[in-house]
Amino acid sequence: MSAAPGGRKRAERAGSDPFVGVGLRSVHFPHLLSRPRLSVRWFEALTENYLDSEGRPLEALLKMREDYPIALHGVSLSIGGVEGPRRGYLQKLKSLAACVQPFLITDHLCFTGAHASNTHDLLPLPYTEEAIATVARNVAIAQDVLGRQIALENVSSYLSYRESVMTEWEFLIAVARRAGCKILLDVNNAYVSAINHRFSPESYVDAVPAELVAQLHLGGYSDTGKFLFDTHSRAPTDPVWELYRRVIRRVPEAPVLIEWDEDVPEWSGLDPEGGA
């Protein structure tokens, strides 16, 4: 069976009555704000789209929050940066969370820059004890400011460090346990990294303890011929669905997000039940 973005097909693949959500995109605001019948159960909002907004985007988000649970998903926390989380960013995030009351706040296990700069890219970390200690310290700061536990997502990677002394999944698990945070397990990212770095994606997902998983992500990648590139521009492929089915058997209650960041379909392509 080929992958398809439609809500009914997605639900069949995700399992019985899954807690499936999609990313909240401004292109869908006009339709969603008319309050149609939807099969999706929750929405994920990209944190940075709302941090400095007091206009229509935030108004639309709060209107959606009246009817659906919301998760906030960030790309700029830079939890792996040696300088620590940016205080201004954390305070803005805290204010946004107080307003939205999300059921989960997530970001990525990476760093995004240095010396107050932001590369707007999710840069992987070396898998070392020093990096674990740095992330754990930064998570403690973030969770103290926010007053809640967060979850960190495994990123797709295209390079490796000579300094690394453990596997990616060993690093991810060690960070979560040391820092006292949860894991947002991106199944597509695990698959992309596994193919790019020639390790077993099954070994990766099987190793992650179920009790650490707070959420799952699914998305589509592009095959460049030399490596897989995480683009979120298409539906998940069959190998990613197979890997997901392997994961969901162990974490059947985990919220599942279908990601689209490029070539976002019309709403009817995401959720046929909400297309009318």
Image: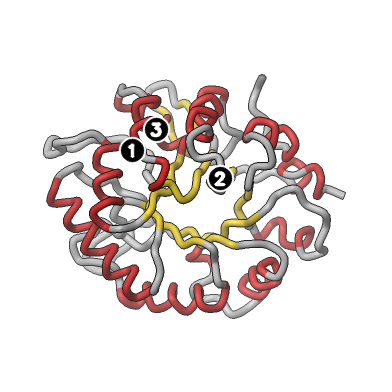
State left or right for residue 184 relative to residue 138: right
Above or below — where is 260 with respect to 179? Answer: above
Q: Mark 2 near mark 1, Cβ–Cβ under 8 Å?
A: no
State the residue at coordinates (43%, 76%).
Answer: 94
Residue position for label 2: 253
Q: Residues within 10 Å of mark 2 (few under 14, many from 20)?
A: some
User: CA–CA distance between discs 2 and 3?
Assistant: 16 Å
Say which element carries label 2: loop
Of residues 240 and 56, the one nearer the viewer is 240
Residue position for label 3: 205
State the residue at coordinates (26%, 50%).
Answer: 175
Residue position for label 1: 157
Colour convention: secondary structure
Q: Residues within 10 Å of mark 3 (few under 14, many from 20)?
A: many
Q: Residue furthest right?
A: 276
State the residue at coordinates (43%, 21%).
Answer: 225
Say which element carries label 3: helix
Please tell me whether mark 1 or mark 3 is closer to you in this view.
3
State which tag comes first along the sequence, 2 or 3. 3
Of residues 230 and 184, the one nearer the viewer is 184
The label shown at residue 248 is: none
User: CA–CA distance between discs 2 and 1?
Assistant: 27 Å
Above or below — where is 87 with respect to 108? Answer: below
Q: Amino acid at mark 3?
A: Val
Q: Amino acid at mark 2?
A: Glu
Where residue 198 appears, as percent x and y from the top left, is 31, 22
Where residue 96 appears, as percent x and y from the top left, is 50, 75
State which tag comes first along the sequence, 1 or 3. 1
